[in-house]
Amino acid sequence: MTTPPRALPSAAAQQTSFHGLSQITSSLYIGNGVVANSKVILSSNHITTVINVSVEVVNTFFENIQYLQVPVADTPSSCLYDFFDPIADHIHSVEMKQGRTLLHCAAGVSRSAALCLAYLMKYHSMSLLDAHTWAKSCRPIIRPNNGFWEQLIRYEFKLFSKNTVHMINSPVGVIPDVYEKEVLSMVPD
């Protein structure tokens, strides 16, 4: 695995709530719609930009925070690919200004996680497999839907001309191979 993005001090120092707010890098967090609307959480974590990757969560707009909307539904047929570069570029530009970004959807599991993985690939030169491993270690509940995985696989190939994650057939249908052991452990012999 490549070097983690600006390694975080320790799990204790992160004060991570897996369902609420999770720190991915020194300047990037993933959260759910509830934390995105908490002035206390946003200010205590010095969030300067909130990126809402949903159609159903309405943000409360707080002073001195920039808001972006990525109106995508959490369905395998939704196109998130076109947002990979512009959102990764925006997260990077916020970091370059010493700001912090909260990337959120409804639960902080699929849409925001997929955009986070795209950012880690583009700006931290991580393979898709390494980006997923890192993000999952920071936020264990991430699980982009299969359509987003297919788009991430295509994006990884665009960036690096190779793939580290593949869609495979399984007893429950086509899945990314990162879930193969998990699925096989749930299927009776």
Image: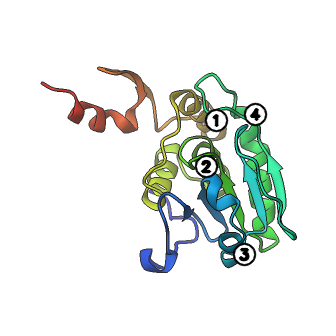
Q: Nearer the viewer, mark 1 or mark 4?
A: 4
Q: Which mark is residue 43?
A: 3
Do the CB atoms of the residues marked 4 and 3 lie less than 8 Å apart?
Answer: no
Q: Which mark is residue 121?
A: 2
Report the quarter where the C terminus lies: top left
The amino acid at mark 1 is: Tyr
Report the quarter where the N terminus lies: bottom left
Residue 49 in the image: state x and y as whole percent: 78, 62
Q: Which structural element holds mark 4?
A: helix
Q: Which mark is residue 48?
A: none
Cα separation between marks 4 and 2: 15 Å
Residue plotted at (15% across, 26% down)? 188
Residue 28 in the image: state x and y as whole percent: 65, 63
| Disc with the residue nearer the chain's start (4 vs 2) | 4
Cα separation between marks 1 and 4: 10 Å
Do the CB atoms of the residues marked 2 and 1 lie less than 8 Å apart?
Answer: yes
Q: Which residue is mark 4?
A: 82
